[in-house]
Amino acid sequence: MAKSYLSRRVAELKPSGIRKFFDIAATMKGVISLGIGEPDFDSPQPIIDAGIRSLRESQTHYTANRGILPLRLALGEHLEKLYGVSYNPEDEIVMTVGGSEALVMACTAVLDPGDEVILPTPCFVSYQGVINLAGGVCVEVPSRMENDFMPNPAELEKAVTPKTKAILINFPCNPTGAVADRDTLVAIGKIAEKYDLIVISDEIYDRLVYGVEHICFSSLPGMRERTILVSGFSKDYAMTGWRIGFACAPSDLLEGMARVHQYMIMTAPTMAQFGALEGLTCCEDFVQKMQKEYNRRRVLIVEGLNYIGLPTFEPKGAFYAFPKVSVTGLDDTIFADRLLHEKHVAVVPGSAFGPGGEGFVRCSYATAFDQLEEALDRIDKFVKSL
């Protein structure tokens, strides 16, 4: 068939830079994967039990579009307790199919064709695609290792044009592990106020921080009314397969997002909503235990990579290290490809995450401690062989 019926937006979407290496690794034996951005912990047993209980009690039907009210009430209390930001469960919170749907909803609801979104990079691989599919235009502003991968507010402001509609930020950051300090976030807020912009803040790793405070962007003075807060339960509660996330925003913004949700999804999975409710009310000890173990692994991998000779700044959040591999003389894609085929360790090239990621690779430490030790040994032998 010579003619393509695909839309231009879809035809121009780039394949995921992560998927390629997963697909290759899946065909090989003995691979240690530092590529996957998923907790290696199982969901807490109380969450599993709550999901099973909901099924046995015939909770197998649609819920309210925005999610079951007890979950929205619990989530509102949770955010107020942690960050001092208050959302009305009735009309300012919607439960979604993971944080991914929340991002799609946010971009679809606020962007008109040609609207620009300022995007600090390196960033999660789906952001550019989500913005483009919503008709928006990405304006990428790279951050740098020498600044701990913090976006430079002056460079962000320089990127503003009359077409700018929003800024999309992600802290703690995937892939760098950077956690924004208050001064940086306040500076971003001032830009948003000055140019009357929306801020979409993806905070999916908010509880996985190490020795620093996570600052919820909408809790900053004046920011609640122009912020769409996106997050979920996948990372903090090891619930990736449950597909349960949420978005919080002022009622006028959320009303528009909820319309997108109604037509696109209807409701988040019922079983997952009951599991998430159990997580919020009963699983804080699990969150703390998981965070503590990730911190132990974080210290191991950062010290190990630096010892090998791959400069790695100290990540303060999420579960990723982002070593600079260009010091070996290889670019990030060749480094990742050769490491996979020669030493059976899977990492993700930094260029997959946008400008500023070139010359780095992402290493997830969401894998067992002994596996990390073995992976570091293999990486060391690989680097020495170059």
Image: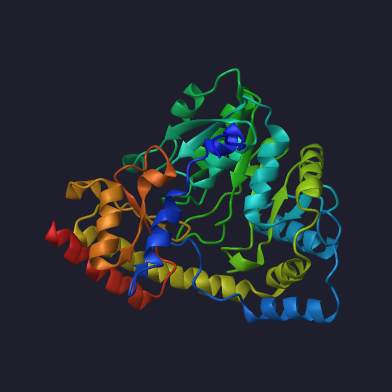
Query: What's the residue at 23%, 64% (across, down)?
Result: 342
Taking the view exactly as shown, the residue that stands out farthest to the top is 162
Q: Quadrant of residue 22?
A: bottom left
Q: Quadrant of the N terminus?
A: top right
Q: Position of residue 325 (x, y in %)?
A: 25, 50
Q: Quadrant of residue 345?
A: bottom left
Query: What's the residue at 72%, 71% (across, down)?
Result: 275
- The answer to whether one can see residue 343 in this image is yes
- The answer to whether one can see residue 152 in this image is no
Q: How many marks?
A: 0
Q: Is residue 179 above or below residue 276?
A: above
Query: What's the residue at 69%, 75% (across, down)?
Result: 282
Q: Quadrant of the C terminus?
A: bottom left
Q: Position of residue 326 (x, y in %)?
A: 23, 46
Q: Is residue 232 left or right of residue 160?
A: right
Q: Position of residue 297 (x, y in %)?
A: 38, 69
